[in-house]
Amino acid sequence: MIIYLCRNSLEGILSGIYDAGTSGKPSCDQKLELIDSYIPELFSTYLEVIPDSKKAESVFSSVEKKISKEACRLLYHGALHCDERRGDHMYRFLIEGFRYGGKVIQMLSLPAVAEMHEMSRAVWGEAHQLTGFVRFTRFKNGNLAGRIGPKHDVLELVSRHFEDRLREENWLLADIKRNKAAVHLRGENTVIVHGLAAGLENQMREAVREDSYGELWKTFFHTIAIPERENRRCQNTHLPLRYRKYMTEWEN
């Protein structure tokens, strides 16, 4: 078995798919793994994939022409999923896609296609949830800042929502788990930066405690609660526990 070790990014995975697809070897004898999470196997040959924008663009262009734009969307969402096998799932999906063309999107009886649809639903669903659960705090200088720690890498998807809603504000939305942030300057396009400043999360927590609007929101949240009608199971279904430590109303 030949195993291609890819970087954890859309470009890295597509570069691995390009190398596997142009190797001339049967797909059953090849697979993709992420370089930061693979477990070595006996009797396998490992090839490290160097991310290459030209290779990634070539794969994406071929998918759009020979399969469909919907297939491109599935690949993009698949690369954002938390499954450590996502690279290989994307590779198997494209094998079926180049075999059947555009109709493959509807062929849910194929495991590779069903898997990609499920990954896409999970990614898009979490991004949609977070547009309602993100809480921004205003610093003393007037800038806004928020924190998230999603299961999937949905920062870019979530930031698009706020780029439209908060276009005339300066804001930052930090993904604490992945050590990166979406930064938006008034009237400009949002950019993704990697590597958060030391102590940024503590500064944001302190800003929450000092924000008078945050205290008003906490008061409102607790005032409208009806203890006699509390339903923890229902609450946990609609508001997963992993979101709460980043939400103002749940701050201690």
Image (cartoon, rainbow, N blue to C red):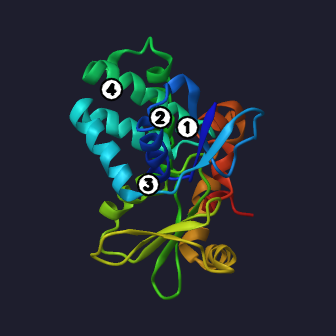
Front: mark 3 or 4: 4
Q: Earlier in the sequence, mark 3 or mark 2?
A: 2
Identify which residue, 159 or 93, lies in the foreground: 93
The picture quadrant where one finds residue 61 is top left
Front: mark 4 or 1: 4
What's the distance in space between the residues labelled 3 and 2, CA to CA? 23 Å
x%, y% of residue 67? 27, 29
x%, y% of residue 243? 63, 50
x%, y% of residue 26? 49, 25
x%, y% of residue 81? 54, 42
Front: mark 3 or 2: 2
The residue drawn where x is 57% and y is 76% is 212
Front: mark 4 or 2: 4
Query: Can you identify the residue that label 2 sits on?
Result: 90
What's the distance in space between the residues labelled 3 and 4, CA to CA? 31 Å
The amino acid marked with disc number 3 is: Val
Which quadrant of the figure contains the N terminus? top right
Query: Can you identify the residue that label 4 sits on?
Result: 98
Tag 4's secondary structure? Answer: helix
Residue extending farthest left: 65
